Image (cartoon, rainbow, N blue to C red):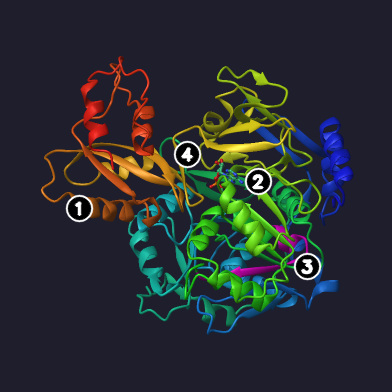
């Protein structure tokens, strides 16, 4: 599965287009299967129906753990760096990780969790998070990890959508100087959930919490009383491995479903090739396991490839803005995979936080989550990579399971602000508004994928029609990414951003409709419209236009109250950065909000708002322009 030169990349890409099934069968053979597959691929993009490695039986944890015990038992699988640099880091070898996963899997079983049951995991970035994920996979339970920054209500929505039987959480979480409640938030969520029978609580902060008799159990106590042996459940390649919720342009977040065989193959193949991982290297992905990046490039990819994955509990700016660089120095990190928003934020603190640290262990850098601007690209390459490290800009999505467009570290040429070329096995196309393919180079359009890849989304949990609608209906027969894209004269791809009503705030996907729904719940709000605008650090910020019943006496206070409501309904990550009170919204005669105008005003570009003659009340545009923030 390893591509080692640019020529090999070209050959592999060619082969993957001419004979995709042969290509993927070759990659998949490198894994440990309990039974071989009968058919490599069965698919159509109309229903959609996509099945990879049908009939194949496996357990992903045998690939992530058992098969490394022979020659890597004492090699670190996970290195854990705590929030506070004064506290001790932990090294978990493959043998120890195997033992802890098996024990915890037996705890899950003890509380009635069986193959196919859904388990919600709401934990900070502690080793137990990776252990809980793998323990679910060990027994065939479906994990649904919910990022620690989501509110009780968001947790409840996700638990109810998936019908989770169990929640795994901690008393609290350390994030920089803050202590954040976790169990208490879960308790609030569970007021609205009837499917959850047991809660396992790991001790982290020693925050006083309530423990309900019969329902709540301490992690540390439970693992003492179970067997250390837990045979891996035999899973079908197309059995569900996990659900991960993500925002779209409409309605509530969707539960993106990934399956055992294809996801394993794709996460591992991309990890090995994109980062050109060599044995013994320390891979530091700064994402949270609550997002797909953490699933694929902290847990599954590195472990299935027998690598060493560094997990960091804290934040990049605490105790100071040198925290990442200190970790790189301390653990001699080889690969650093982070997000443009983190780079821009650390840039703004100045080079004094970089210069005292020895970054000579670094070999490869990666970026993910949003388009990386030229300045941040060069700063990262020059000041962190010392112009010596490869820098890969990796484009992908929760739905793709793994990296799709990128350069291969050190093999394929880099171009600042360009993700680069499709990986072998990925067949891209650009289309115009009518769905016509735009061929040739030096063109732009909407980014679609025309052929299945093993890591792709299979369905949206509990609602297959929603999956079809969201990804396969805009351009029939194609998977539509929601991104705009250009292909330059050399065939390099540059993602220009979402073309739907999704905002990318600090690499987090937020649906405008979700934020609007939350704002509209606030007392005195009549209606709202939310758009994204360029933000120096976050990439995009959230700009809300709000109509209130009466003019707010104290607009500043009202803004804070709205932020509190959004925090309660969704979580702090969806708080608007700017709130403009308006008396009306620019609507067409058919009642549709002309978001184009709102976006322009939010961007501060009010000179050319285009044709406003179809608006019901064109005068409102002047009011909005005058009040722009
Ligand atoms: C959206 C997916 C899977 C990575 C974490 C985000 C944007 C992601 C890039 C990149 C430009 C990027 C796209 C995509 N995006 N990576 N390298 N360059 N844009 O996953 O939350 O599912 O969001 O993030 O707009 O559609 P996600």
Left or right of 207 in this view: 404: right
Q: CA distance from mark 3 to mark 1?
A: 57 Å
Q: Which residue is mark 2?
A: 416
| 394 to 445, vertically: above or below | below
Residue 302 within the magenta-colored segment of the rendering: yes
Q: Specify which label sits upstream in the sequence, 4 or 3.
A: 3
Q: Which residues are magenta?
A: 301-314
Q: CA distance from mark 2 to mark 3?
A: 40 Å
Secondary structure of the residue carrying tag 3 is: helix
Secondary structure of the residue carrying tag 4 is: loop
Q: CA distance from mark 1 to mark 2?
A: 40 Å
Q: Which residue is mark 4?
A: 248
Q: Specify which label sits upstream in the sequence, 4 or 2.
A: 4
Secondary structure of the residue carrying tag 2 is: loop
Secondary structure of the residue carrying tag 1 is: helix
Q: Specify which label sits upstream in the sequence, 1 or 2.
A: 2
Q: Specify which label sits upstream in the sequence, 1 or 4.
A: 4
Q: Position of residue 166 (x, y in %)?
A: 49, 62
Q: Nearer the viewer, mark 4 or mark 2?
A: 2
Dot label at residue 66: 3
Residue 32 within the magenta-colored segment of the rendering: no
Q: Which residue is mark 1?
A: 556
Which residue corresponds to the image point at 28% horizontal and 23% vertical from the top-left? 587
Q: CA distance from mark 4 to mark 3?
A: 37 Å
Left or right of 373 in this view: 69: right
């Amino acid at each position: 599965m390893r591509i080692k030169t640019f020529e090999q990349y070209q050959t592999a890409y060619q082969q993957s287009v001419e004979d995709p099934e042969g290509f993927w069968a070759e990659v998949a053979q490198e894994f440990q299967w309990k039974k071989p597959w009968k058919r490599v691929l069965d698919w159509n993009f109309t229903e959609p129906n996509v099945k990879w490695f049908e009939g194949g039986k496996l357990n992903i944890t045998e690939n992530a753990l058992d098969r490394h015990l022979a020659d890597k038992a004492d090699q670190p699988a996970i290195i854990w760096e705590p929030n506070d640099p004064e506290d001790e880091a932990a090294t978990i070898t493959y043998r120890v990780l195997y033992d802890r996963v098996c024990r915890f899997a037996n705890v899950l079983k003890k509380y009635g969790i069986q193959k196919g049951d859904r388990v919600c995991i709401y934990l900070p970035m502690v080793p137990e998070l990776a252990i809980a994920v793998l323990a679910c996979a060990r027994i065939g339970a479906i994990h649904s990890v919910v990022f620690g920054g989501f509110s009780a209500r968001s947790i409840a929505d996700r638990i109810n959508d998936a019908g989770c039987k169990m929640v795994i959480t901690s008393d609290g979480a350390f994030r920089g100087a803050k202590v954040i409640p976790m169990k208490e938030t879960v308790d609030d969520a569970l007021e609205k959930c009837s499917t959850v029978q047991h809660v396992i609580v790991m001790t982290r902060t020693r925050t006083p919490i309530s423990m309900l008799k019969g329902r709540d159990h301490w992690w540390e106590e439970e693992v003492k009383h179970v067997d250390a042996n837990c045979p891996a459940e035999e899973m079908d390649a197309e059995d569900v491995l996990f659900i991960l919720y993500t925002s779209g342009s409409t309605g509530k977040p969707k539960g993106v479903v990934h399956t055992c065989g294809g996801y394993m193959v794709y996460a591992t193949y991309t990890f090995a090739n994109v980062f050109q991982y060599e044995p013994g290297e320390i891979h530091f992905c700064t994402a949270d396991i609550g997002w797909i990046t953490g699933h694929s490039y902290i847990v599954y990819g590195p472990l299935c490839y027998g690598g060493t994955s560094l997990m960091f509990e804290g934040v990049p700016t605490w105790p100071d803005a040198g925290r990442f660089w200190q970790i790189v120095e301390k653990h001699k990190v080889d690969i650093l995979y982070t997000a443009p928003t983190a780079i821009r934020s650390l840039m703004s603190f100045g080079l004094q936080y970089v210069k005292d640290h020895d970054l000579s262990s670094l070999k490869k850098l990666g970026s993910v989550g949003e388009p990386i601007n030229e300045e941040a690209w060069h700063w990262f390459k020059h000041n962190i990579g010392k112009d010596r490290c490869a820098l890969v800009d990796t484009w992908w999505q929760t739905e793709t399971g793994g990296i799709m467009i990128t350069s291969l570290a050190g093999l394929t040429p880099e171009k600042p602000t360009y993700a680069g070329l499709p990986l072998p096995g990925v067949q891209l196309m650009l289309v115009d508004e009518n769905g016509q393919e735009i061929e040739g180079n030096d063109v732009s359009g909407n980014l679609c994928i025309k052929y299945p890849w093993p890591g792709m989304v299979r369905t949206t949990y509990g609602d297959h029609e929603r999956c079809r609608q969201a990804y396969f209906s805009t351009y029939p027969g194609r998977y539509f990414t929601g991104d705009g894209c250009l292909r330059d004269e050399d065939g390099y791809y540059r993602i220009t951003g979402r073309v739907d009503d999704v905002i990318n705030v600090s690499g987090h996907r937020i649906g405008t409709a979700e934020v609007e729904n939350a704002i509209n719940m606030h007392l005195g709000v009549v209606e709202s419209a939310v758009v994204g605008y360029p933000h120096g650090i976050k990439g995009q910020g959230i700009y809300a236009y709000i109509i209130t019943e009466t003019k707010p006496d104290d607009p500043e206070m009202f803004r804070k109250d709205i932020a509190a409501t959004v925090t309660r309904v969704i979580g702090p990550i969806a708080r608007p950065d700017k709130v403009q009170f308006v008396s009306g919204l620019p609507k067409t005669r058919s009642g549709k909000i002309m978001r184009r105008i709102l976006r322009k005003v939010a961007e501060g570009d009010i000179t050319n708002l285009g044709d406003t003659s179809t608006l019901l009340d064109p005068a409102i545009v002047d009011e909005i322009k005058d009040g722009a923030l």
